[in-house]
Image (spheres, rainbow, N blue to C red):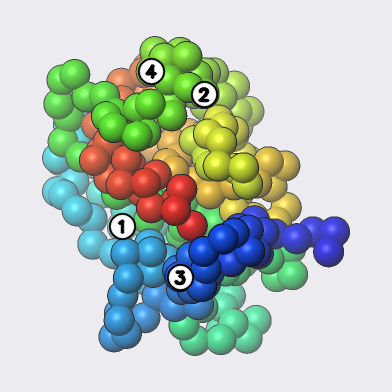
Amino acid sequence: MENENFYNRRKFLSSSAKGLLIAGLASSEILTSCSPGKKVTLEKSMATGFDQTPLPYSYSALEDVIDALTMEIHYTKHAAGYSKNLKEAAAAEGVPAGTSVEEILAKVSKYSTKMRNNAGGHFNHELFWKTMRPKRSNNVPQGALATAIDGAFTSFEGFKLQFANAAGSRFGSGWAWLILDRNNSLKIVSTPNQDNPIMDVAEVKGMPVFGLDVWEHAYYLKYQNKRADYISRWWEVANWDYIQNRYEQLIKI
Ligand code: MN
């Protein structure tokens, strides 16, 4: 198929590779269920549901990189709105119960603009909250992710420069992403509005390892027009434990 999406391709590659079954199942679990009542594998637990999950820290926990008022408005107003509107769109457009947000995103061109904006917005923010934690010094990736970053971008410093360039040069509202593409290569991309690289309409497709929100609502109270300052300070609150774990799960799919 012309527009074979990332998930189908990955599922095909996994199940046709010499082993199995288990790899194929694991990837389909991400697609088919995020129901908390069912048996949850680590892979399945990565699938995103339609409700907001609780913020894993207080609104003030990311001070002074991201201020408490920004966090509160961002979580309780902006992100809450995406979740609410996603649920409305899903009901109106006949999305079956138990569908993950990732499944919708992978064929988002078949849905409305409301679905695109809000399924995207909800997924992006659910991931964003988890990839932050209270700031710490010398906050750098470790392990397999650190090795992969060095391989793809020469060094962590080189990676941060390229990432900052993608985030800083995104015109208007959008996101910068570190993704795993179809070949399991790390790439830096950016998307407009609430789009993301899982979408079948994305220019470069892949699975987000993490993303940085560069909408003005994410930083304007503290940084005003100085987006570059927000980007350069964000690394202090990056939750590398979460991001590394996500990377290690994604490369197995
Ligand atoms: Mn946002």
For disc 3, the neighbor class at 10 Å (few under 14, some 14 to 19, many from 20) is few
Which residue position is annotated with label 1?
76
Residue 221 against residue 15 in the figure, above or below? above
Q: Secondary structure at mark 1?
A: helix
Rendering quarter of residue 219: top left
Amino acid, disc 3: Ile
User: Residue at 37% across / 46% down in the picture?
Assistant: 248
**Given the current orientation, which residue lies at the most extreme front position?**
18
Q: Closer to the observer: label 4 or label 2?
A: 2
Which residue position is annotated with label 4?
156
Q: CA distance from mark 4 to mark 3?
A: 33 Å
User: Residue at 30% across / 21% down in the picture?
Assistant: 233
Q: Secondary structure at mark 4?
A: helix
Which residue position is annotated with label 2?
152
Q: Is mark 3 within 8 Å of ligand 1?
A: no
Q: CA distance from mark 4 to mark 2?
A: 10 Å
State the quadrant of the N terminus.
bottom right
Rendering quarter of residue 106: bottom right
Whether residue 61 is visible, yes or no, is yes
Which residue position is annotated with label 3?
22
x%, y% of residue 174?
A: 56, 38
Q: Earlier in the sequence, mark 3 or mark 1?
A: 3
x%, y% of residue 195?
A: 60, 49
